[in-house]
Amino acid sequence: MAHVALKNDYPGIGGLLTSFPETGNILLNLAETLLRGPSSLTSAERETIATMVSAGNKCKFCTMSHAAAARSHWGEDSDIVDSVLAGDYSKLDAKLSALLAIAEHVRGRVTPTPDHLVQQARDAGADDKAIHDTVLIAAAFSMYNRYVEGLATYAPEGIEAYAAMGERLAKQGYLSPRS
């Protein structure tokens, strides 16, 4: 049971966002912008970054829901998500692998990202927008993860509980009504 009274029975961050719309709407708009807005990164790449950060922060709900969205975006290449969750980046291109290293740094500490990580990403083809978006996704998802876990929200069990949610996020986005 969540540490605060919720006005609904939505799992994870959904219950918080709709129960507290004054902050929820801002957080939803941020997620929509970061994961679906203009970027040199695909939505699949951005959802994969959010998934890796959430897994590193041990936020089950965010890991599972964003992994499901990433799988939907990747389509036939959806096994990339499970490889990343297993710590295997061999299926990734050099750019996404380098960006995940940046995201891991940002997730784990509040220090400047080392120059060599940024240079590796640039050498692999990442532009300023990709590096910016990666850092902001990692920082924002660290906050989202702490919000979800800090208030002890409910996280469904099993990958199948997240499949429809991930499909909805991938196809309709973060601002669409819940069904």
Image (spheres, rainbow, N blue to C red):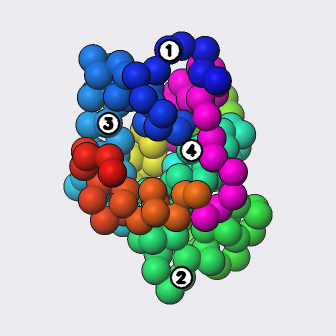
Between 47 and 64, the one lying in front of the other is: 64
**Label of residue 5 in the image:** 1
- The nearer-to-camera label among 2 and 1 is 1
Q: Which residue is drawn at 74% across and 68% down?
A: 88
Give the Cα separation between the discs numbered 3 and 1. Answer: 20 Å
Name the residue type under label 2.
Asp
Q: Which residue is drawn at 56% across and 44% down?
A: 62
Characterize the magenta stretch by its predominant secondary structure: helix
Q: Which residue is drawn at 32% across and 47% down?
A: 178
Q: Which residue is drawn at 35% across and 19% down?
A: 20
Name the residue type under label 1.
Ala
Give the Cα separation between the discs numbered 2 and 1. Answer: 40 Å
Secondary-structure class at tag 1: loop
Secondary-structure class at tag 2: helix
Name the residue type under label 4.
Cys
Q: Position of residue 134 (x, y in %)?
A: 46, 48
Secondary-structure class at tag 3: helix
- The nearer-to-camera label among 4 and 2 is 4
Q: Where is residue 175 in the image (x, y as percent from the top left)?
A: 25, 45
Cβ–Cβ under 8 Å for marks 2 and 1: no
- The nearer-to-camera label among 1 and 4 is 1
Range of magenta residues: 138-160
Badge 4: residue crowd in 10 Å (few <14, some 14–19, many ≥20): many
Between 34 and 19, the one lying in front of the other is: 19
Query: Which residue lies under the disc numbered 3?
Result: 28
